[in-house]
Amino acid sequence: MARILLVDDEEPVRGFLKRGLELDGHQVGTAVDGSDALERLTEAGGAFDLVLTDIRMPVMDGIALALAAKRDFPDLPILLMTGFADQRERAKNLDAIVVDVLTKPFSLAEARAAVKRVLETRSPVTG
């Protein structure tokens, strides 16, 4: 399945999503903020199929991460998450960079479905 980098400063959210995405067979790495995530992306040479990141985080937020990640790894899909309306508005200006924005609170099923949609549009099925 896919290799996903999950970025959220809240450990309960990270753990919940990581376990849920692993149920679908994905390999999920985690980061605590955008700076940590950018470091992990760089170390891996961008070898992830998706970045799933919260917007509002300390140190480097998800939008700054999305901008830096797209600059360094232009083909990397980025899916944002937020519970704040003003942050969702900021993300609307990033249509060329992010594939979608999940609005918190969301169910695990909604998150898994959003990830599946992104991965299906990015990776044509061969067989």
Image (tube, rainbow, N blue to C red):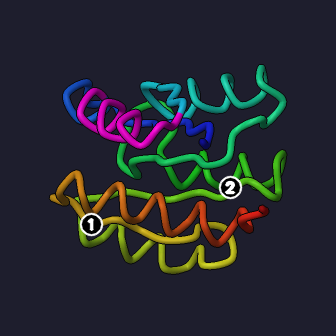
Q: In which image quadrant can residue 23 be found?
A: top left
**For the point 26% across and 24% down, which residue is it?**
11
Residue on which the image places disc 2: 67
Picture disc at residue 103: 1
The amino acid type, in three-letter code, at marker 1 is Thr
The kind of secondary structure element at disc 1 is strand
- Residue 70: x, y in percent? 75, 55
Main SS class of the magenta portion in the image: helix
> Crowding near pointer 1: few (<14 within 10 Å), some, many (20+)?
some
Q: In which image quadrant can residue 112 be found?
A: bottom left
- Asked if the magenta segment contains residue 16, the reply would be yes
Read off the magenta span: 15-26
**For the point 51% across and 37% down, which residue is it?**
26
Task: Kindly give the residue lying farthest to the front in the view shown.
Answer: 127
Q: Between label 1 and label 2, give the one nearer the viewer.
A: 1
The kind of secondary structure element at disc 2 is helix
